[in-house]
Amino acid sequence: MLSAEDGKELKVAVMVSGGGTNLQAIIDAVKEGRIHDTKIVRVISNKADAYALKRAEDAGIEATAVTRSEYGSKEAFDKALLEALEEAGPDLVVLAGFLVVLSPGIIRKYRGRIINIHPSLIPSFCGEGYYGLRVHEEALKRGVRVTGATVHFVDEGCDTGPIIMQKAVEVMPGDTPEILQRRVMEQAEWKILPETIDRIARGEIAIGDVSGGES
């Protein structure tokens, strides 16, 4: 097991596909001291036009795009993603809205050191195809009164890794998927993802060869 040591910065790589609101929450929390002894060493996106890359550049963080169209096969793309991570040398990999299924090679290399934020209370509304607005659309269709967000370790399954933190969010009358998505981000995602990283940096949550959630 690994944990952050006193006086040693936790090196974090953040992988993101879109606008990067969760990335911004992490950047702000590091800047404001709510995440201790942590440095974002690289932001990686699979989309060259992802606004997350600009957020990283504006914050003085190294940013790179590794796009599927650059490579002739999925294997070559997966290899390039792994190389982009290895070059950064992170202690922790954070998936902050990264809409790519990580290869078994990346999961093996960083087993127990990859976390993901998902916009529901797992095991509800998760798994293959559940991302973005669809999660909130399905929650509203089902008529749930409470939803939320989950931070979990990443394994070979889809949203199946050990849960680290969850936060509940109330569903309000008249919610649309867009309104609910925003509330879940503001009240849950932007809070528990930075908090999880801080707890890892403090050594309260161990990373490494994890077999079950919080340590």
Image (tube, rainbow, N blue to C red):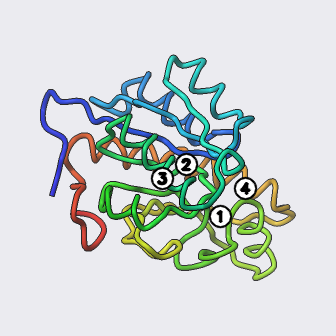
User: Toward the viewer: 158 or 166?
Assistant: 158
> Residue 134: image x %, image y %?
76, 68
Distance from the alpha carbon under mark 1 to that under mark 3: 41 Å
SS at mark 2? Answer: loop
> Residue 118: image x %, image y %?
56, 61
Residue contact at pointers 2 and 4, CB within 8 angstroms: no
- Which residue is the site of mark 4? 181
User: Toward the viewer: 51 or 85?
Assistant: 85
Residue appearing at x 21%, y 50% in the figure:
204
First reached walking from the N terminus: tag 1 or tag 2: 2
> Residue 132: image x %, image y %?
72, 59
How packed is label 4: few (under 14 Cα within 10 Å), some, or many (20 or more)? many
Q: Nearer the viewer, mark 3 or mark 2?
A: 3
- Which residue is the site of mark 3? 79
Above or below for 162 versus 194 = below
Residue appearing at x 68%, y 64% in the figure:
131
- Which residue is the site of mark 1? 170
First reached walking from the N terminus: tag 1 or tag 4: 1
Mark 3: which amino acid?
Lys
Mark 1: which amino acid?
Glu
Distance from the alpha carbon under mark 1 to that under mark 4: 12 Å
Q: Nearer the viewer, mark 2 or mark 4?
A: 2
Mark 4: which amino acid?
Gln
Residue appearing at x 52%, y 56% in the figure:
78
Residue contact at pointers 3 and 2, CB within 8 angstroms: no
